[in-house]
Amino acid sequence: MSLDLFLQYLFAGITYGSIYAIVAIGFNIIYNTTGIINFAQGEFVMLGGMIAISLLEYLPLGYAIAAAVLITMAIGALIEMLFIRWLESPSVLRMIIITIGISILLRESALHIWGESIRSLPYFYGNEITTFNLGSVHISPQVVWVIVACAVMMAGLSVFFRSTPIGREMRACAANRTAALLCGINTRNMVTLSFMLSAGIGALAGCVMSPITYTQYDSGTSLAIKGFTVAILGGLGNSLAAVAAGILLGIIEAFSVSVVPLAFQDAIAIAILLLILFVKPHGIFGSSEAARLKDF
Amino acid sequence: MLRIRNLDAGYGKLRVLKNISLHVKAGEIVTMIGANGAGKTTLLHTVVGLVRPMRGDIVFLGRSNGRSSVAKIVASGCALVPEGRQVFAPMSVEENLLLGGHVLQKERGRAAVLKELEHQYELFPILRERRRQLAGTLSGGEQQMLAMGRALMSGPKLVMMDEPSTGLAPLIVRDIFQIIRRLREEGNTVLLIEQNARAALGIADRGYVLEVGKVILQGPAADLLANADVQRAYLGREKIG
């Protein structure tokens, strides 16, 4: 393999990897405050893209994306309030099954609203064939958008969790829910907030990736599987590890194209997921001690 | 300050507390002693709202706690130092304390929280030394102090402590009890639950003895210390003659 080709694959891997990382972080945020895996996370990504595409008729691109993110956040909050909030001490399994139900519901609603057609947002800058050259590698400006958007989201989230009081309270809920309650923190509001937050970042990811990957009513499913693989690979609940794991999976997938046919890409992600669940179920960066303390 | 009348509480169909009545007056240290499984922790959890009462009233500062949320009850000035410390292990000592100040922050703003933080650092100098350290890396005694400091950060009117001495070395237990005494001197009211009956009755004004969900004895702490049944059951001493 020539160096050029190598770099080209590398960039493709990093691009997809950052998207997987964002989906995984969405999983982690909800996992940390509730202990459940929200299987509707991929649908948030799909909704973000679809809503932005529909709004594009009435609004300029930037506003359409902002509005799509806000609407998806509202949908996330609504879902939590309708389906999760009123449950009296539900079991983890029950909540997970509810989120699977929600994901089917969202997917079918999207099918009714938008149909089966494949859509996409326009390239934010230039078009499909615009590239700029980094040495001998051709890179689409949209790739830069994806990577920058993911990096900014990561940085924003880390500032939010580290230095704002609300971020601190959400971390407290993750660390010890009973103790958070005893501090007078309304943990139910924190759960709603975590749904909003992961819906929001999912939607934003859905918007920036839409020009490259296209958006369809069921595009959330495969993303959810990839995101879940990455979240497990990094160790559930650990967002920094999710970034590393996401990029790792992206790169593995990108390079696999040079060895096996493209159609095997999804199989590779699932093979990795199975391998990890068999060999190292707490993830490559997770500690087994921490894994034992979790209820799921 | 706190008045509990004919309280029944438990989990699901299981009734742990049966017809409990007790009261705590402002400025007192009241202790409740009893064996494992007597329902001591359930009682505190019911007062703070983690467990819903099945019957009876809990009146705190003239208001009924019955159906309020934990957040509301804590905001009204009733703090619990939970059994087994329950610190936020992956967060720093200072973050733990600031989280304890959540209620204060909402009511009186950031300046009040910082002032209270300073006060906790005076009460527990070791926490100031360790304030950047993760709470999970502290020793048991330090974690207990952190849990107490965190509860006190809300500026509570009543502090309830669930077995603060469990699993601590005797020297550290002495420190903890000294701090409880100091809390009273500062005008706090304390409801203390302990298995270490001798130490608890030693600093308390009054005491209750709980056995399988019922209050079987109550009275001034000195009387309970002298009571033959209490001595036999909880102080490990048989009086002969």
Image: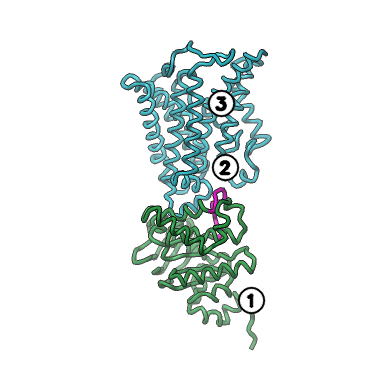
Chain colours: A cyan, B green
Pointers 2 and 3 in contact (C-beta within 8 Å): no
**Marks 3, 1 in one chain:** no
**Marks 2, 3 in one chain:** yes
Label ID, residue A113: none
Quadrant in which the C terminus of chain A is drawn: top right
Q: Residue at x 58, y 75 (%)?
A: B198
Please give the range of residues in magenta. Answer: B83-93
> Is residue A88 a member of the stretch shown in magenta?
no
Q: Nearer the viewer, mark 3 or mark 1?
A: 3
Q: Residue at x 50, y 34 (%)?
A: A155
Determine which quarter of the picture holds residue A254. Answer: top right
Q: Which residue is mark 2?
A: A296
The amino acid marked with disc number 1 is Gly
Query: Toward the viewer: B78 or B49?
Result: B78
Q: Main secondary structure of the magenta part?
A: loop
Mark 2 Cα-neighbour bin, 10 Å: few <14, some 14–19, many ≥20: few
Query: Toward the viewer: B34 or A187?
Result: A187
Label ID, residue B236: 1
Tell me: residue B34, above or below residue A286. Answer: below
Q: Which residue is mark 3?
A: A17
The amino acid marked with disc number 3 is Gly
Is residue A168 at all visible to an observer of this figure?
yes
The amino acid marked with disc number 2 is Phe
Q: Residue at x 57, y 38 (%)?
A: A236
Q: CA distance from mark 3 to mark 1?
A: 65 Å
Mark 3 Cα-neighbour bin, 10 Å: few <14, some 14–19, many ≥20: many
